[in-house]
Image (cartoon, rainbow, N blue to C red):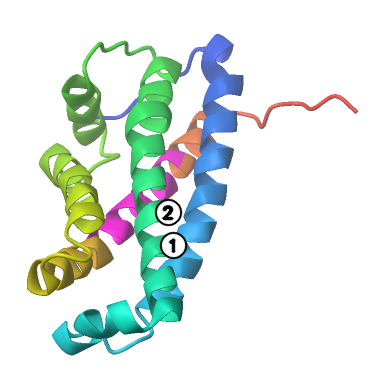
């Protein structure tokens, strides 16, 4: 599905939302690169309770992952849909649109990332194996989030959406 034009009245809000997503992604990329530079395994996860510095890295990654995932699903993708003249009431409809438009490879994978974020928050101190498994899935899911931003940015460029003008 290729979108041909855009609605100028939605351009400023969509562009600002993209810029915020890019900033959030930059922070997540930092946490991602510092966390996954470690040799993560089950023993590493079990030792988090006795290593506050590493636990803080994990918590920063989980927080930033969740924040970016929320921003994309609740703000950026819906505003991109509005920009190109699509209006949806439910998140699944917005995600289905994004999949058809080539912004998401899979709406189901995006929804799974939301559940994954919840697992990362709740299983952190309770089930080391489940937390480790969720962390490894988040490694892949973070790449999906980065790809969504890259694809929307490419669409903005293709459509000729201009950055918002700021007043001095």
In the picture, the quarter occupied by the N terminus is: top left
* Disc 2 crowd, CA 10 A, few/some/many (<14, 14-19, 20+): many
The residue lying furthest to the right in this view is: 168
Would you name the residue on which mark 2 appears? 64
Q: How many numbered marks does the figure carry?
A: 2
Would you name the residue on which mark 1 appears? 60
Q: Give the number of the disc on residue 125.
A: none
Image quarter of residue 2: top left
In the picture, the quarter occupied by the C terminus is: top right
Residue 113 sits above or below residue 86 on the image: below
**Residue 149, can we see it?**
yes
Task: Let me know if residue 167 is in the magenta part.
Answer: no
Residue drawn at x 39%, y 53% as measured from the top left:
63
Residue drawn at x 40%, y 44% as measured from the top left:
67
- 20, 66: nearer the viewer: 66
Left or right: 133 as drawn, with respect to 163? left
Q: Which residues are magenta?
A: 141-152
Residue drawn at x 20%, y 53% as measured from the top left:
122
- Residues under numbered marks 1 and 2 in contact, where contact means CB atoms less than 8 Å apart: yes
Residue 28 sits above or below residue 51 on the image: above
Left or right: 15 as drawn, with respect to 36? right
Q: Position of residue 55 (x, y in %)?
A: 37, 73
Task: Let me know if residue 142 is in the magenta part.
Answer: yes
Q: Position of residue 160 (x, y in %)?
A: 57, 30
The residue lying furthest to the front in this view is: 50
Q: Secondary structure at mark 2?
A: helix
**Residue 160, can we see it?**
no
- 97, 23: nearer the viewer: 23
Dominant secondary structure of the residues highlighted in magenta in the image: helix
Residue 16 sits above or below residue 137 on the image: above
């Amino acid at each position: 599905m290729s979108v041909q034009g855009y609605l100028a009245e939605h351009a400023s809000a969509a562009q600002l939302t993209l810029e915020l997503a890019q900033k959030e992604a930059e922070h997540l990329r930092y946490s991602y690169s510092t966390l996954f530079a470690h040799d993560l395994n089950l023993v590493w996860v079990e030792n988090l309770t006795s290593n506050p510095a590493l636990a803080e890295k994990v918590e920063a990654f989980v927080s930033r992952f969740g924040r970016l995932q929320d921003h994309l699903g609740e703000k950026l993708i819906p505003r991109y849909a509005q920009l190109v003249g699509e209006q949806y009431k439910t998140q699944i409809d917005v995600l289905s649109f994004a999949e058809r438009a080539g912004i998401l490879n899979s709406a189901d994978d995006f929804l799974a990332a939301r559940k994954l974020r919840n697992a990362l928050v709740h299983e952190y101190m309770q089930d080391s194996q489940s937390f480790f498994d969720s962390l490894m899935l988040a490694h892949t899911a973070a790449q999906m989030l980065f790809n969504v931003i890259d694809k929307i940015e490419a669409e903005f460029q293709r459509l000729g959406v201009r950055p918002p003008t700021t007043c001095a």
